[in-house]
Each structure stands twice: as C-alpha cells, then as structure tokens.
Amino acid sequence: MDFIFLLIALAGLCAFSVAKNAAARGGGLLAATVFGLLWFFTSCAIIVPPGYAGVVFNRLSGVERNVLPTGFHFIVPVVQTVAMHDCRTQSMSFQGEEAISSDQQVVHTDVTVNFHPRVPELSLLYQEVGFDYPEKIVTPVVREALKAEVAKHPVDQLLANREQVSGQIRDYVSHKLGERHIDMELITLTNLKFSHEYQSAVELKQVALQQAEAKRNELLKAKVEAEITKTMADAEAYKIMQTNKALSGSPEYVRLEAIRKLNPNAEVIYVPHGSSILLPGVTPGEKPAGR
C-alpha cells in the first residue's frame, strides 16, 4: 500500500511540473502532497500489535539487535523494514513417537510441548534460524531428548519412574531450547504404549505372580495350621506327663494299675481319702459283700 501511495505522489509531482495552467498545477501539487504524506506515515510509522514483536532489518547493516515491542514506532523508509512475529505461547504435539528402551523394547508415546521465543533475543533467533524455528529446533530437540532418556531405562521401569523420566526430558529440552533463544513452558508425556509381544509377556508375568502368591498363601496357611496342631499336641502330652508324674508315686495309683492288669474290664471308682460313698444295694454303715 505504501508503494501505491508513493507512485500516486510521484504522479502528482509530475503533473505539477508539466501542467500549463494554475488549476492543473495546484491539483498535481495537492495530490503529491497528500499521497506523499500518506506514503511517509505508512512507510515510516509501524504499529506492533499485542502479543507480537518486530525485528528490524536494515538494508545497510543487516538485522538490528533492538526488537520493537508492542506499540507505535518510527523507522527509516526504504532503509529499514520490520518483520512481525507472534511471541505468544506456541504448542506442538507428537503422536506415537518411537523410542528404544535399554532392554531393546520399542516404546511409543505422545508428547506435547509449549514454548515461546524470548522477545529480547528475537533478532538473534531470526538471524540464526528464522521464524520457522519450531520445525528446525523444537522438533529435533524434543525427539532427541525422548530417545536419549528412554534409552537409559528398562521398559518395566518407565511406568514406575514416569515422573523422573518426564523431569529429565523437561530439563534437557529446557536447556537445549534456552541455548537457541527459546523458553520452554511445559512438556508432557502421555499414552505410553509397548509392543504386543511385550504386553502379552507382561500379562503372563502378572498371572504367574498371582498364582505364585496364591501358592505362597496356601503354604503359609498350612504352616500355621501345622504349628497350631503341634502346639495342641505338645500341650496334651505335657498334661499327660504331669498327670503320670503326679500319680506315679501314689500307692493307690500302683494298686489301680495292678487291678487294670488283672481285670481290664473292672470298673474303678476313685474315692478321696476319708470320704464315704453310697453303693447301690448297700445300707449305710454296712460293709458290701465280698469286701
């Protein structure tokens, strides 16, 4: 648009110079003045919108270090041009990124990374890489970090140490992007997936572990029951031993054992010393027959 204003202003200036009458000369001068002013303001005045920054390119000295922030700015027409760039948060997603674990298992995961360029260093980023840095810098760094970190762990520890793995990847990506004038805001790893063979092996291992745990519980139960039985048997044996020990020195006990030897079917009644007992068919005070 500023180039069109410049052409119209030059045309008005030419009309002013070749016109023969005063009216034509006045019209040419007015057109040259109006469109010359429009060209001046459109080519010299730059408005940087919110969320953007401007990189100044000088045709004489190259990319300038100063970066134009949001607002109104003046530049030198023709000599300076401004490249606008969105400096707000950008997001990139990687679906099913492949990496190899330390035990040679294939792992697939989804990765999301949020980042933005450093505004004060935007001119350096533009000069070194350009504004297509997401493809040239962010993508390779994220993939490199993922592959390098996953390769340090066996596959069965990736889920158990997921936070540690994510933290290592986050630190690596943040450091590498910072070296290239980019700030990383967030990186997340989701949907860790393994090969079908490994999934089947994991399921079989889980079944085997469950079966082993069930057998272990059965053995523990049998051991406890055996210990209970042994304790009860020991208690009964101790009781019998103490009873035999108490009765072994008693004459009545010797007499009882003699009766049992002579007549195993004999019925024996124990009567405490000094006590009397009533037998069927015997009058109190009368001695039973045969005694």
Image (cartoon, grey):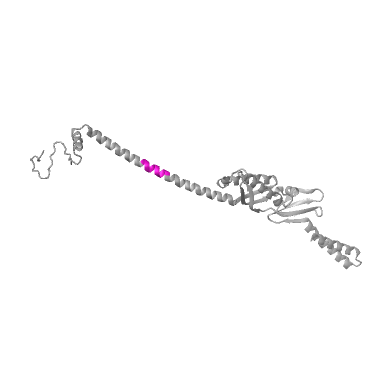
**Residue 7: % across, % down:** 84, 61
**Residue 288 is a magenta residue:** no
Rendered position, 89 above or below 255: below
Magenta: main secondary structure = helix
Residue farthest to the top? Answer: 249
Q: Nearer the viewer, residue 268 or 130?
A: 268
Seen at 86% across and 65% down, the residue is 28
Q: Write down the region rendered in magenta.
A: 219-227
Quarter of the rendering containing residue 168: top right
- Can see residue 27? yes
Quarter of the rendering containing residue 43: bottom right
The quarter of the picture where the C terminus appears is top left
**Residue 182: % across, % down:** 68, 48
User: 239 left or right of 267?
Assistant: right
Q: How many marks?
A: 0
The quarter of the picture where the N terminus appears is bottom right
Seen at 29% across and 36% down, the residue is 238
